[in-house]
Image: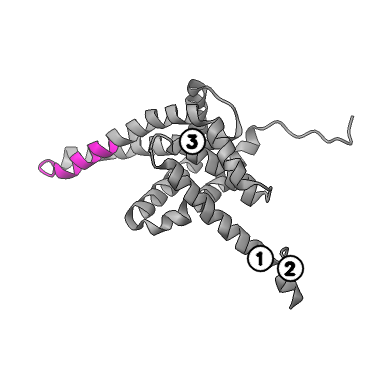
Amino acid sequence: MGNLFNPDAFFWRWCSRILDVMVLSILWFFCSIPLVTAGAASTALYDAAVHGIRRDEPGAYARFFRTFRRELKTATLATLLWGAAAAVLLWGGSMIGTAVQAPGPVLALAVVFAALLFLVLGVASWMFPLLSRFEFSLRALNRTAGQFFIVHLPSSLLLALLLAGSVWTCWRFLFPICFVPCTEALAASLLIERAFSKHMPPKKDPTKT
C-alpha cells in the first residue's frame, strides 16, 4: 500500500506522462494560434515529447519554450512556404469537389491534388523534427526534408496520413486538441527516430582507444 504513494511508482509515473502529454499539447495549441508560428510550435513539441517523455529527461516544458524561441525564425519561414502550398491545394481540392459536370477529368485532377497534398504533408512531417534536432538554413531544411521524404517513402506515407488524421480530428471535434498533438508527435517519433538513427554517425565506445 505504501508503494502507491511512492512518486516513483508505476501508477504515478504514468499519471505524470499523461499530464505531460496534455500540457505539451495545450502549449502547442496556444503557441500555434497565430498560425505562422505553428511550425515553431511543432518543432518545440517534437523536441519536448521525444526528450521529455520518450527519453524521460527532465525539463520538458522549459525545453519546449527554449526550442520554440531558438527555431522561431526558420520554422516561421518554412510554415509560410509550405502552409501556403497546403492552402492552395486544399482550395483547389474544394473547387474540384464542386465540379461534378466532368467526372473523368475531375477524378484525374483530384488524384493529382491528393498526391501533391501528400507531398506537402510528408515533407512537413520530416521538416520540423529535423529542425528540432539539427541547425538548418531554410534552403537546407527544405532540401533535407525532401531527401528524407524520398528515401523513407513508406514512412513518409504513414507520417502524412497520421498528420492528416490528427489535424482532421482536432478540427472536427476540438476537444482532442488537449492530447492529440503530443500523441501524434510521439507516434511519429517511432518512425522518425528510426530514420534519424540510420543517418547519424555511430557512437564511439569510450572504452576503446
Please tell me in which quadrant of the rendered image residue 70 appears.
Answer: top right
Whole-percent x, y for residue 101 in the image: 10, 42
Tell me whether the residue at label 2 lies in contact with that at label 1, contact meaning CB atoms closer than 8 angstroms: yes
Specify the label residue 12 is tagged with.
1
- Mark 1: few/some/many CA within 10 Å (<14, 14-19, 20+): some
Residue found farthest to the bottom? 1
> For the residue labelled by badge 1, is the local secondary structure a helix, a strand or a loop?
helix
Sequence order check, earlier mark of 2 and 1: 2
**Which quarter of the figure is the C terminus placed in?**
top right
Total numbered badges shown on the rendered structure: 3
Which residue is at a point 41% across and 39% down the rendered structure image? 121
Specify the label residue 6 is tagged with.
2
Tell me whether the residue at label 1 lies in contact with that at label 3, contact meaning CB atoms closer than 8 angstroms: no
Residue where numbered disc 3 is placed: 40
Three-letter amino acid code at disc 3? Answer: Ala
Q: Which residues are magenta?
A: 89-102
Along the horizontal axis of the image, is 107 left or right of 179?
left
- In magenta segment, residue 157: no
Which residue is at a point 42% across and 51% down the rendered structure image? 166
